[in-house]
């Protein structure tokens, strides 16, 4: 295998750093606390979910067109549970096995489910507790590139 030139090494380091910054930016766990404090608090049986934002680059390093990114965001059915209301999953008759998800989980929901609320940098969704279809470990596992 050929040894990398200094320029190639620098480019690889910069690309790796940009990819890590993008992953950190997309991770809701790394959200600025001031943004989290401004997100509405769910009431009753509702959950606040932050829809998954697809990466702007493919794994091969190609930048995606803005239209492709917007198309993916509209089709997003994955989100991060930011908060749950005090009555979410409290109905033991409806949820005999307990909560379907909790704060900090990645979930799947129907495309048009919940109320959409625009916030700085995107949108959030307020969903009813029974609108969660599944939990997942990583939204990139089920998202398809356009």
Image (tube, rainbow, N blue to C red):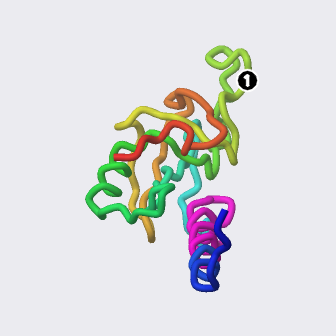
Closer to us: 145 or 40 = 145
- Give the labeled residue for mark 1: 98
Residue range corresponding to the magenta coloring: 13-34
Name the residue located 63 percent from the left edge and 66 percent from the top edge: 24
Residue 5 inside the magenta-drawn segment:
no
- Residue 137 x %, y %: 66, 39
Query: Taking 47 as reference, is 73 above or below it?
Result: below
- Residue 16 x %, y %: 62, 70
- Residue 121 x %, y %: 44, 69
Q: Is residue 34 visible?
A: no
Residue 25 inside the magenta-drawn segment:
yes
For this view, does 5 lie left or right of residue 55?
right
Name the residue located 62 percent from the left edge and 17 percent from the top edge: 94
Closer to us: 10 or 70 = 10
Which residue appears farthest toward the front when viewing the image? 1
The quarter holding residue 18 reads bottom right
Q: Can residue 100 be seen in this view?
A: yes
- Residue 54 x %, y %: 46, 54
Where's the N terminus, which quadrant? Answer: bottom right
For this view, does 136 lie left or right of residue 61?
right
Closer to us: 71 or 80 = 71
Main secondary-structure element of the magenta-colored stretch: helix
């Amino acid at each position: 295998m050929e040894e990398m030139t200094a320029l190639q090494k620098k480019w690889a380091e910069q690309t790796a750093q940009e990819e890590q910054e993008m992953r950190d930016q997309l991770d809701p766990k790394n959200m600025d606390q001031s943004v989290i404090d401004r997100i509405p608090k769910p009431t009753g049986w509702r959950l606040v979910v932050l829809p998954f934002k697809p990466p702007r680059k493919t794994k091969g390093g190609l930048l995606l067109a803005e239209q492709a990114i917007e198309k993916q965001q509209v089709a997003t059915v994955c989100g991060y549970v930011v908060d749950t209301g005090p009555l979410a999953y409290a109905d033991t008759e409806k949820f005999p096995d307990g909560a379907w998800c909790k704060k900090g989980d990645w979930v799947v929901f129907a495309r048009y489910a919940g109320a959409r609320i625009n916030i700085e940098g995107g949108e959030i969704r307020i969903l009813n507790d029974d609108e969660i279809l599944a939990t997942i470990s990583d939204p990139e596992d089920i998202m398809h590139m356009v």
